[in-house]
Image (cartoon, rainbow, N blue to C red):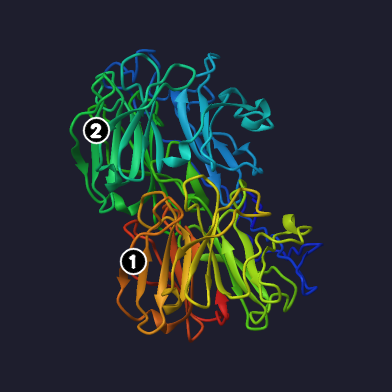
Amino acid sequence: MRFSRVAAAVAASAALVLAAAGTSSADGHARTVGSPRIAVPQPTFHKPMTRAAVKPHPVESADGKPASFRSDFNGDGSSDFLYTALDGNTYYKDRVDADTVAYPDSAEKVKDWLYPGDLTGDGVPDVLGLSLGGNLRLFSGAGIRNANGLSAEGYTTVGTGFQKYSKLFIPGDLNGDGNADLLARTPSGDLVFYPGTGKGFGSPVTIGHGGWQQYDELIGAGDLNGDGNADLLARTLDGSLYEYNGLGNGTLSAKKLLGTGYQKYTEIIGGGDYDGDGYPDLAVRDTTGTGTLYLMHGNGDGSFAAPTAVGDGWQYTTQLGGGGNIPFYGKHEFIGQTAAGTLYWYGSNGDGGFQGKTRTSDVGGFPPSQLYLAFANALTSNGYPDLVGKDNYDGHIYNYQTYAANDTNGLAGGSKSYNLVTGPGDLNQDGKGDLIARDTSGNLYYYAGNGTGLSVQGRVQIGTGGWNQYNAIVGGGDLNNDGIADIVARQTSTGALYLYPGLGNGRFGGKVLIGSSGWNQYTTIASPGDMNGDGKADLIAESKTGGLYFYAGLGNGKFGARVSIATSGFTFKYLY
């Protein structure tokens, strides 16, 4: 589903958009879903007070560039912002001018933006974009403020295969050669060092063996203590922030605790100097409904001043350039299916709630008696979810998005015995969304996606019996902070909720009890993806009285306390 964006307030309601053509299944029914477009506002950024440096400006590497350089695209001596919004566009924001589109919503989504400094040799800092498929692409920063943005001058691929990592970040120069280096974390918690070459990156070296999976934010911070070496920050799930200082040889010092209470921020952005005093600062986004952005001035000795509010409306952003969070892969929305078969779409408002209610199908076009639906996480490289389903008439699995309208063969042959389909995301670490199906005997099957949204690879049985004990199996991304999609299942007899962690090979680990009882009080549950902008998959549940509850993912496979986000109006047969 796609959004549109304006620099005004959120539209009170969304216009109905219906597809002109449909996917025709073997029973002759033409079924499509439209593409609702919700307007989201432009965030604000108040120019912070410029602080005079109390000592000569430090540099973060041997190239002599100031702390602001890696994200100072207009050359005014202070860092700027790149941010991706809920409409899919990436915007450039400086301290004065109106936001401009730096990278348009396109067929090839960029899930994370990194700041490597100047790799093209033109004196302007450049940008690295990480695609869903794990390609690391170099964009010339000179185009960031042009009419067509970064895409106008194309890109150069400087690395592939990076989808195997849960997080990439650039702290600056770690080995003293004057080039910004790249760090990557594996799902198992190793830290890998890619030395910068000035035009790309060299061969990887593991510098941290295990333990790094404890952090849900890894921030490339620049030179925090003025010793000429880049440093990094790492946050644990309980909100403790640790500092690791670079030693100038590609390795890091032991960690030291910098502070606590940082769990109240959904994203921490490092490596920039926003006040022009020469010291790296932190920008942090809070978890409240106003999406306040705070600046923490760097003191040049590894510490930071107390946060100062510098903007609002940042809850509508899904990723900020240089952000330390694991970039979220997949949806920020959900669909309700009535008992009569009409579909309604709801979009995230970025703070755990929703906005808009848009009918996105023909009235009665998707009757539950004829279909088992799933709102699958990103079957194509555009990063948007796809409505798919098993048709009871022929057992085939179809994609009902408009781009697949002429595909009469469907995604897969499927089986008439299937009674559940779900699309939790990338299960085999190839950067493509996958599908799961269950049959009436309780067997579970895995379909690896190929990135087209028009077909999938042949099915592989990954569970023999037993899966029919669950009346709901849902997933919409990573729940346990390893960057691999997971699923949760609700047991029919007890109402207990279980986590099945993805292993990265298309299979799941052993079940983990995360809710002992009570989940059968809900008529339907669903995974809407990340609804509060912290990069963690969340859960929603519809009560028998028509209310809707939000459960925030905590990053440890569990969910926070429920929050009521609607007291009435939710009487759907199913949520997806």
The residue beneath circle 1 is 511
Secondary element at tag 2? strand
Quadrant where the image shows the C terminus: bottom right
Relative vertical location of residue 535 with respect to residue 438 in this rendering, above or below: above
Residue 259 occupies quadrant: top left
Nearest the camera: 552 or 249? 249
Residue 349 as seen in the image, left or right of residue 339 = left
Residue 531 in the image, given as x and y percentages of width and height: 48, 60
Q: Nearer the viewer, mark 2 or mark 1?
A: 1
Nearest the camera: 324 or 260? 324
Label 2, label 1: how many angstroms apart (C-alpha)? 35 Å
Can the viewer see residue 83 in this picture?
yes
Residue 257 as seen in the image, left or right of residue 213 = left
Q: Residue at x 48, y 86 (%)?
A: 544
Mark closer to the chain start, 2 or 1 = 2
Residue 241 as seen in the image, left or right of residue 51 = left
